Amino acid sequence: MKRKYICIILLLVIFGSLSCVSRASFRYRPVPRQSLVVDTGVFYDELAPYGRWFRLDPYGWVWTPAGVSFGWRPYTHGHWVWTDYGWTWVSRWRWGWAPFHYGRWFHHSHHGWVWVPGTVWGPAWVVWRHQPGWIGWAPMPPQVEWRSGIGFNLSYGEMDNLIEPFAYTFVEERYLPEGTLDQHLELAARNVTLLRGTRNVTNYESIENRVINRSVNVERIENATGRKVTQHRIVDTNPAGVMNGEMVRGNEVITYRPAVTAVRPERAPRSVEPERGRPPADITRREETERRHLEQEQRRAQTDLERLHRREQQRSAGRPASDELRNQQERERRALNEQRQREQQVLRGRQETRRKVEPSPEGRSRPEPARKPAGRKP
């Protein structure tokens, strides 16, 4: 009898293990990309739980993420991987498969970073800059279009004129392929200095209808890191396969990469209902908490910049700092002050917007009904 129970238990354990393996293999099972043909409504549905859709001229429906800090920039919460499509961004955000591979980003003074949907998949849509020791990137703005078989509608120099210094992210080139890349990012206030020493190296090509990102020479990165950079293969999956963010598994990058048609759905994006009936005192506490978090982030950035400036001054071996160094550090302090003002403005804008759409207990403020898009997005 005892032996019988042991056999039953073993069978249950084996069955459970096989069931888990089956679920895991189904979740990440590759699917042929040609079967993933959708319209832009896929973005409306999949991104609604993670941010807010709203209409903004001249773009039409745009999206801004929730849960990001006020100093956040696109292409920072993840890392770069060398793939059969060149340098590819692998995001850790659950929603990262869409806004970092389709469409364009821009910074709005009231809403912060805003994403404009697009239909062409790319390994990443960024402008690249380089100098020996440093690499930087910034999201391409909506004015930049990719034309199949032709390339970009603007020159790289024209792109430079459209991108503000604060939009860039810089890192020492030895850290570019690191999985912990976001732990090595340079302070945004330093961009004004690094932009002066770097040059635009953006290089995207169209090969067999594939967008290839060859902006950064992989051999240079191998020399900087002292080890070979492994090439990975892009593997397509369904939305469930990236529910926790894109992932690297062995020599594969698992991502959701549907072929998006230019057809615009005749409906508004789905919106996630705000929490109803929140007492005014709770709203005030939440806004105060947001302000304190922002002040903490800004103090940390101030402290980090001051520490960096002291180290630079100490390298002069007791000699007075040169005029060039003083001017550089003054530019960086001004950039930090501008960053602080920009983040405070976005905080006020987000809180004002939330008050308009979040119903009060008395129902004085109700969200406006969603309107159908009046026209096509450029």
Image (cartoon, helix red, strand yellow):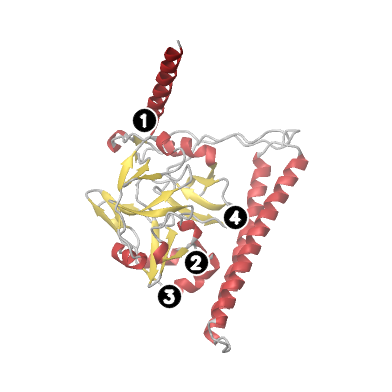
Crowd band around label 3 with a 10 angstrom C-alpha radius: few (<14), some (14–19), many (20+):
few
Compared with 360, 248 (above or below) is below
Crowd band around label 1 with a 10 angstrom C-alpha radius: few (<14), some (14–19), many (20+):
some
Asked if one can make out residue 203 in the rendered structure from this viewpoint, the answer is: yes
Which callout, 4 or 2, points to the residue nearer the camera?
Answer: 4
**N-terminal of the two: label 2 or label 3?**
2
Residue in the picture at 51% in, 71% down: 192
The kind of residue on which mark 4 rests is: Phe
Which callout, 2 or 3, points to the residue nearer the camera?
Answer: 3
Q: CA distance from mark 1 to mark 4?
A: 37 Å
The kind of residue on which mark 3 rests is: Gly
The kind of residue on which mark 2 rests is: Pro
Q: Tag 2's secondary structure?
A: helix
Residue nearest the observer in this picture, 57 or 31: 31
Give the labeled residue for mark 4: 70
Give the labeled residue for mark 2: 165
Residue nearest the observer in this picture, 191 or 154: 191
Q: Tag 3's secondary structure?
A: helix
Which callout, 2 or 1, points to the residue nearer the camera?
Answer: 1
Q: CA distance from mark 4 to mark 2?
A: 16 Å
Asked if one can make out residue 334 in the rendered structure from this viewpoint, the answer is: no
Measured from the top left, where is residue 1 in percent x and y? 45, 10
Residue in the picture at 28% in, 36% down: 34
Q: CA distance from mark 2 to mark 3?
A: 13 Å
